[in-house]
Image: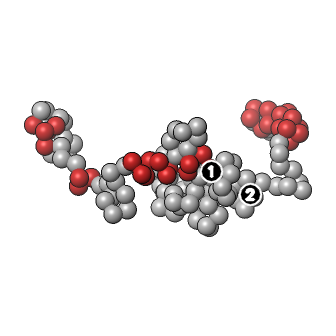
């Protein structure tokens, strides 16, 4: 027996296929130009292997994703990297940030002594 979601999916499938840019001859995948960050605004992935999609691991706590294999240097489309209409972009953020590869942000840079002195609750103490 089909679930309500499956029934609705079957009803909507034709309309979605008709309006989709992708079809049997031009299937979307992790290697499709629209999936790769190649200088245009569409693609976000890097094509460097690694992470292409997320499937939950039932042996790990829910709500967690392992980002260790995300290539954040080469990923993103044109607007992610350069910004748009003079706003944002990774290049701009890296240029104005006081943190970079030589001066990386970490918890050791933060002092919460004043917060604690002012009564901030401390977990585990």
Query: In the visual, does 68 lie left or right of 98?
Result: right
User: Which is nearer the eye, 28 or 78?
Assistant: 78
Q: What numbered label is drawn on residue 77?
A: 1
Question: Looking at the image, is mark 1 or mark 2 earlier in the sequence?
Answer: 2
Residue that extends furthest to the front in the rendered view of this protein: 86
Query: In the visual, does 68 lie left or right of 84?
Result: left
Query: In the visual, does 96 lie left or right of 42?
Result: left
User: Which is nearer the eye, 85 or 34?
Assistant: 85
Q: What numbered label is drawn on residue 12?
A: none
User: Which is nearer the eye, 125 or 72?
Assistant: 72
User: Which is nearer the eye, 48 or 116?
Assistant: 48
Mark 2 lies on residue: 33
Query: In the visual, does 101 lie left or right of 8?
Result: left
Q: Position of residue 113 (x, y in %)?
A: 13, 43
Asked where in the image residue 121 lies, by quadrant, the reply is top left
Q: How many marks?
A: 2
Residue 7 visible = no
Q: Position of residue 11 (x, y in %)?
A: 85, 33
Rendered residue at 89%/39% (across/down): 18
- Determine the secondary structure under disc 2: loop
């Amino acid at each position: 027996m089909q679930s309500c979601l499956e029934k609705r999916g079957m009803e909507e499938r034709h309309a979605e296929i008709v309006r989709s840019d992708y079809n049997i001859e031009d299937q979307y995948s992790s290697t499709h130009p629209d999936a790769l960050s190649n200088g245009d605004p569409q693609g976000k992935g890097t094509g460097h292997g690694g992470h292409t999609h997320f499937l939950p691991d039932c042996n790990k706590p829910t709500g967690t994703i392992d980002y260790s294999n995300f290539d954040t240097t080469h990923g993103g489309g044109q607007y992610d990297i350069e910004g748009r209409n003079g706003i944002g972009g990774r290049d701009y953020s890296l240029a104005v940030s006081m943190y970079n590869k030589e001066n990386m942000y970490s918890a050791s840079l933060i002092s919460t002594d004043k917060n604690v002195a002012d009564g901030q609750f401390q977990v585990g103490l």
